[in-house]
Amino acid sequence: MSILCGVPILECVYCLGCARWLWKKCLYSAGHESENWGLATAEEFAPVPRLCRLILSVYEDDLRNPLWAPPGGYGINPDWVVVKRTYEDTGGCAAPYMIYLDHDNADVVLAIRGLNLAKESDYAVLLDNKLGQTKFDGGYVHNGLLKAAKWVFDTECELLRDLVEMNPDYRLTFAGHSLGAGIVSLIVMHAVQNRDRLGNIERKRIRCFAMAPARCVSLNLAVRYADVINSIVLQDDFLPRTTTVLEDVYKSIFCLPCLLCLMCLKDTCTLEEKMLKDPTRLYAPGRLYHIVERKPFRIGRFPPVVRTAVPVDGRFEHLVLSCNATSDHAIIWLERESQRALDLMLEKDRIMEIPAQQRMQRQESLAREHNEEYEAALRRAVALEIPQAAYSSSYGTFAEVEKGEGSGSSSGARSSLLSFKRMRERWDNFIERLFDVDESGRMVFKKSST
């Protein structure tokens, strides 16, 4: 009888927990995750729209007669396509991809398309994983994506080495969307570990742009490879936030309320410190770029703003209750909004009329700034006692800068990270207060109001 009397109490506790979770979710918006991040510049964000269009072109059967080209076309030369692999070529080991020699931008690009809902082989790659199943370079990675990444690398490494050696001034860029984003992220990590198979290419010439990636690496690897991997997330995209094992998601399609109840209890009862110290928990890889275009309790889309950081905690930890959670994952919307954001950045630079010399200085300061952020993230990971996290000043691709006294506290590292990014924002605000744009588009001093 005493046990039966306790059942209503347990039901009340469960209902209160669910109500608290739902209240937090209703007030939570994707913009909160990156509100303290710095703004991205046009120089660092410029490749994103172009690579989105290149990924979209992989979907085409005939690039000379495209059927799904975005407005303005793909912007590629079909004669520069080195190789294009289909599902028949990959045998289901990986998604279709293309190697493109971009002479206009001095790039050797390997682009992989996203998940094909009609292909069982793509599901097999995505669902081939269990937490803690596969170790890599002192951390954990997604097992199925690592297998696909190794297959692509082993198949194309000789071709990529020849292209890199024939074009010594070109960068080696990997780009992918969704499933392909996870594959290229792990290709880059595998390539960095095996640079001898690519003609001993310098690490700083390798980079990756993962569009709407799946969570595929543990936290220590996500931070350590932030100098070569860039993840781009559009507002409320669900996939970089999906912490539930993907296999359980697909098994629960016909019992979604059961899954939501379990997620509810897990979200409410799990402490953030426990999540951070779980070595098998997977995250979106590398440096994060968050495109924010909607505001809470507002209707419609606003001019997109791109924020960037190398966060350790608060790394897209929560799903967002939004009707755009799935549409924001689409590569078409990602290409469109990233191009809008880049156009706004370029327009702002044009209005400010930045001289060429100052542009070069800004690029150098951007490299130093990224180095500061990268090292601050490594120090914070060590301070938070992230499993397998280690700080090494020589790790990374940017030029070394002078260190301060010791590693400092975690709060000091985080504050320096934020203050450095805010310096640029304050300078832009200062310019806007002093200058106006006349009818001809030139900047003139504001007239004092009397």
Image (tube, rainbow, N blue to C red):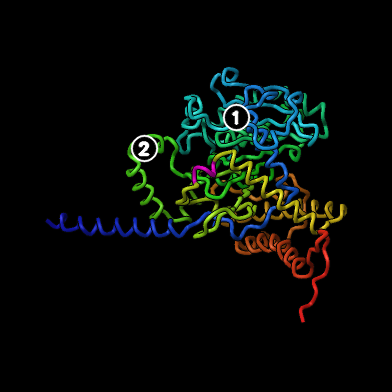
Predominant SS of the magenta segment: helix
* First in residue order: circle 2 vs circle 1: 1
Proximity of marks 2 and 1: CB atoms separated by less than 8 Å? no
Is 42 drawn above or below residue 172 in the view shown? below
Q: Residue at x 33, y 44 (%)?
A: 257
Q: Tell me the residue that label 1 is attached to.
A: 149
- State the image coordinates of residue 29 (x, y, percent, origin top left): 50, 56
Residue type of the residue flagged with mark 1:
Ala
In the image, residue 405 above or below residue 47 = below
Q: Quadrant of the C terminus?
A: bottom right
Viewer-side residue, 279 vs 271:
271
In the rendered image, residue 147 lying in the magenta stretch gets the answer: no
**Which span of residues is magenta-colored?**
325-329
Mark 2 against mark 1, which lies toward the viewer?
A: 2
Q: How many marks?
A: 2
Which residue corresponds to mark 2?
252
Residues under labels 2 and 1: Cα distance?
28 Å
In depth, the one of 400 and 369 nearer the eye is 369
- Rendered image quadrant of residue 433: bottom right
Q: Amino acid at mark 2?
A: Ser
Helix or strand or loop: what does disc 1 sit on? helix
Residue 435 percent coordinates (x, y): 79, 67
User: Residue at 59% across / 53% down in the picture?
Assistant: 293
Q: Nearer the viewer, residue 382 or 321?
A: 321
